[in-house]
Amino acid sequence: MSGTGAQAGAQEPIMSDSLRDQVRASGFAIVPAEEMRGHLGAVSMHDFSAFADSWNALDLDRYMADGGHYRRRRHAVFSLRDGALERLPHQPHYQSRDYNSLNGGIERWFTEVKPEIAASPVLKSVTAACRDVFALDPALPYRVEMHQFRIEATPGEAGQPTPEGMHRDGVDWVCVMLIDRVNLEQGVTSIAAPDGTPLGAFTLAAPMDAVFVDDHRVMHGVTAVTPADPGRPGYRDVLVLTFKAGQASSD
């Protein structure tokens, strides 16, 4: 694994003592890896290494309307209620074109997340951290979608972490945690108000750097990535968890 920690631009907000308070105040919170490890509690580096290694077995995303071959992924859907995370039968990922003008409007069937990864202590701990930061209502069911993304960059093709540009995901809450970043330049995350007003810019640089987002209040996007050493490919691995209150099944 590589990286030296979250790198912030001039517009990085001041971190508050309470992530929950910061999300309430700003619509998002940036969490450096060292702090994130504290929030994940008993997760060991062995657990994290095994979890991160599964990003080496992702399949090509064949739904890229821009014709790109730079994204690999796996996907899973869960129900979260009363703190219990239950995996649901495999189902498609769907976004309307209102939220994803590039790839939305169709059911996208991605390769399933492996069972041992869906049951990983890392996933359970990240989900628990999200539950606390987002102050999820224990009386409500939440549909949780897990996305494993690898964005690849080669001398002939830049990688696009968010090819749809600045966007909202059409859910309630989003957590993005960096898994690894190898031989890359750029990949700057920007946060903006719905009217486009910039609110923050930073780079997830070290494994476990994370950002928590209120999807109703802010948009997010990430700049293209290119190889730092043009003689070698590079990649950016992230875990994305989204939460939406209400019916958690595919019905």
Image (tube, rainbow, N blue to C red):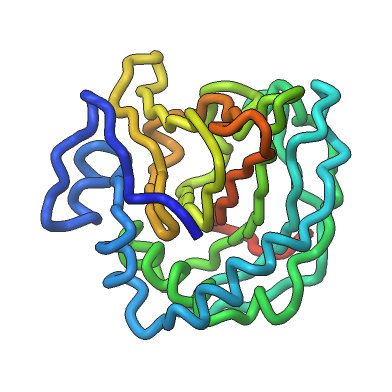
Q: Position of residue 144 (x, y in %)?
A: 59, 61
Q: Quadrant of the C terminus?
A: bottom right
Left or right of residue 31, residue 67 in this image: right
In the figure, 217 relative to 80: above or below?
above
Q: Residue at x 41, y 45 (%)?
A: 205
Q: Nearer the viewer, residue 119 or 82?
A: 119
Q: Position of residue 152 (x, y in %)?
A: 69, 39
Left or right of residue 96, residue 224 in this image: left
In the figure, 115 relative to 224: above or below?
below
The image quarter containing residue 154 is top right
In the figure, 104 relative to 207: above or below?
above
Q: Residue at x 29, y 25 (%)?
A: 199
Left or right of residue 13, residue 158 in this image: right
Residue at the far front: name it.
231
Q: Is residue 244 visible?
A: no
Q: Residue at x 57, y 58 (%)?
A: 246
Q: Residue at x 65, y 63 (%)?
A: 248
Q: Position of residue 216 (x, y in %)?
A: 43, 36
